[in-house]
Amino acid sequence: MTYAGVVEVGGPADVRELPDLVISKVAVGSTNNNAYLLRCRATDEQLLIDAAAEPQTLLSLIGDSGIASVVTTHRHGDHWGALAEVLGATGAHTYAGAYDTEGIPVPTDVPVADGDTLRVGRVELTARHLTGHTPGSIALVYDDPHGHPHPRVSHVPAKPWTGGRVPPAGWPVPPAGPRVPLLRLPRPHCPQGDGEWHRRARSPCPRPAGR
Ligand SMILES: [Zn+2]
């Protein structure tokens, strides 16, 4: 079946099958967050992006083979609500953007900077630090050697600071570097294509109380 990237809470995952990587996207929780399970075809190693909510849904998607790591794309609570439970069941290592680790209540094993390489089996992903939304939001880009870059193997937060907005007082300002404004990332190549991209970019991202 053709991948469309359309998922709903309570429904099945949508699966994108690439030559070296399988990406399963599922919607979870009251805020309809997406989690992504990446599996290296060569080694069957798995990586979960955003243990957002519904730990049992995520653990059943993960299956018996477990996961090596969990990446949290940013500090807002709707992106790590099931992280402790998933780690308890899998013993995975945790990754998050270096500037957001302080805002995630589950310890981060590996703080991630822009340009860092993350691996799932033999597949390499590049972390991109996104300007805006939180100090340490990251996206993961998979540059498919058999195709084109896939920037949407993970959640990309809405509400960037670009366009003149100023980070809230007290938030660390990342050092100068190749930070990537949200909408300059290459766009996904899928039947929904730009439509999904822009819809997600415009939609609000729920924040925990007090943010
Ligand atoms: Zn958010």
Image (cartoon, rainbow, N blue to C red):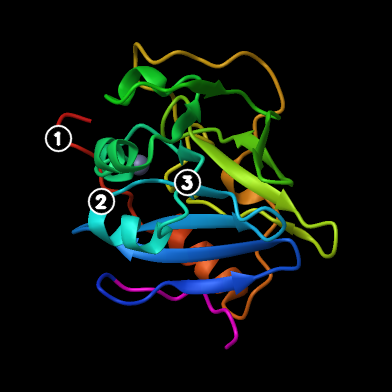
Q: Which span is picked out in magenta? A: 1-8
Label 1 crowd bin: few (<14), some (14–19), many (20+), radius 10 Å: few
Considering depth in this image, is 21 or 211 the residue closer to the camera?
A: 21
Upstream in the sequence, badge 3 or badge 1? Answer: 3
Q: Is residue 202 visible?
A: no
Q: Are marks 3 and 1 in contact (CB under 8 Å)?
A: no
Quadrant that contains the C terminus:
top left
Position of the N terminus by quadrant:
bottom right
Q: Is residue 33 magenta?
A: no
- Ligand 1's image quarter is top left
- Pick out the residue farthest to the bottom: 1
The three-letter code of the residue at mark 3 reads: Ile
User: Of the residues under marks 2 and 1, which one precedes in the sequence?
Assistant: 2
Q: Is residue 85 left or right of residue 130?
A: left
**Residue where numbered disc 3 is placed:** 67
Residue that carries the numbered disc 1 in the rendered image: 209
Expressed as whole percent of the image width and height from the top left, the position of residue 168 reads 35, 21
Residue 90 figure quarter: top left
Magenta segment's dominant SS is loop
> Residue beneath label 2, please?
53
C-alpha span from label 3 to label 2: 16 Å
In the displayed structure, 203 sits above or below 76; it is below
Distance CA(mark 2)–CA(mark 1): 17 Å
Which residue is at 25% across, 41% downward? Answer: 85
Task: Indicate the secondary structure of the residue bearing disc 1.
Answer: loop
Q: Is mark 2 within 8 Å of ligand 1?
A: no
**Nearer-the-camera pick, 136 or 101:** 101
Amino acid beneath label 1: Ala
On whether ligand 1 comes within 8 Å of the CB at mark 1, the answer is: no
